[in-house]
Image (cartoon, helix red, strand yellow):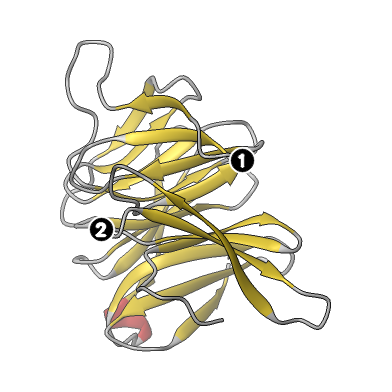
Amino acid sequence: CNVSESPAAVCIVSDVEAAVSFGSKKMIQFVSMMSNGELLPTRILKMDHECWGLAIAVDKMYITDGGGGNLYVYGLNGKVIRRMSQDESGEKIFSWANHLTVSNNGKIYVADMLNGLIALDIKGEVLWKYPGGSDLIGAFGVCVDGCGNVFVCGIRSENVLELGDDGERLGEVVSAKIHGISGHPICVLFDTNNCRLIVTCSRNDEIVIFGV
């Protein structure tokens, strides 16, 4: 499926529809799968902010705006529901919010370039942060496995970490150096059907699959 711009993130809307964000182009493109398997770009939502991370859950669309430091919640019709940017003390939550995901129990996980991995509840209250250190530099991609565990990749530390539902570090599951990956891990997805971790990297066109 050809799109007019370079995509930043993609997520599933339904069995026959996906949504794609386009970063500084400030838009979300919906793509439908036709009966013959062809992917067809359909409607576009124009936003007044950048659109980087993208997740859809329970008919709501969650969008991060990168360096703007905001997480927006929209209806699928494009109407804004909520904006999350500050904690209860008034401090900024995000520095540069990259990819995000929403778990089955409604927790929101945001990979932040400088602040590591941030977990929030559905109202936007911060549950915990995993700032990392040398083991997580430049948090970028994030996903969940459906069993309470979270995977986050560091584009500069060149790895993928596994954390528990409470933010406890469970271990490093992917290392570019150890596993011989070319490029920097930038996006991660957990295949629940086959218990596999799928990783893509910048600077190459490879998809690397790991058994977990």
Q: Name the residue under label 1.
A: 57
Locate residue 189, reporting x and y percent.
53, 63
For the point 37% across and 83% down, the residue is 179
Q: In this view, does 134 lie above or below 70?
A: below
* Of labels 1 and 2, the one closer to you: 2
Q: In this view, does 178 lie above or below 127?
A: below
Q: Name the residue under label 2.
A: 24
Locate residue 183, reporting x and y percent.
27, 83
Name of the residue lying farthest toward the right: 35
Do residues under tags 1 and 2 come within 8 Å of each other at their CB atoms?
A: no
What amino acid is found at the position of numbered circle 2 in the picture?
Answer: Ser
Locate residue 69, reporting x and y percent.
22, 37
What amino acid is found at the position of numbered circle 1 in the picture?
Answer: Ala
For the point 39% across and 52% down, the residue is 53
The quadrant of the rendering that contains the C terminus is bottom right
Locate residue 50, reporting x and y percent.
28, 50
Q: Is residue 155 above or below residue 103?
A: below
Q: Residue 145 carries which label?
A: none
Q: Residue 37 sits in which quadrant? A: bottom right
Describe residue 210's horizontal placement relative to residue 33 as left or right. Answer: left
Which of 165 and 17 lies nearest the eye of the viewer? Answer: 17
The quadrant of the rendering that contains the N terminus is bottom right
Helix, strand or loop for disc 2:
loop
Q: Residue 200 sits in which quadrant? A: bottom left
Indicate which disc, 1 or 2, sits on the residue closer to the N terminus: 2
Describe residue 191's horizontal placement relative to residue 160 as left or right. Answer: right
Which of 24 and 70 lies nearest the eye of the viewer? Answer: 24
For the point 68% across and 67% down, the residue is 32
Q: Residue 63 sits in which quadrant? A: top left
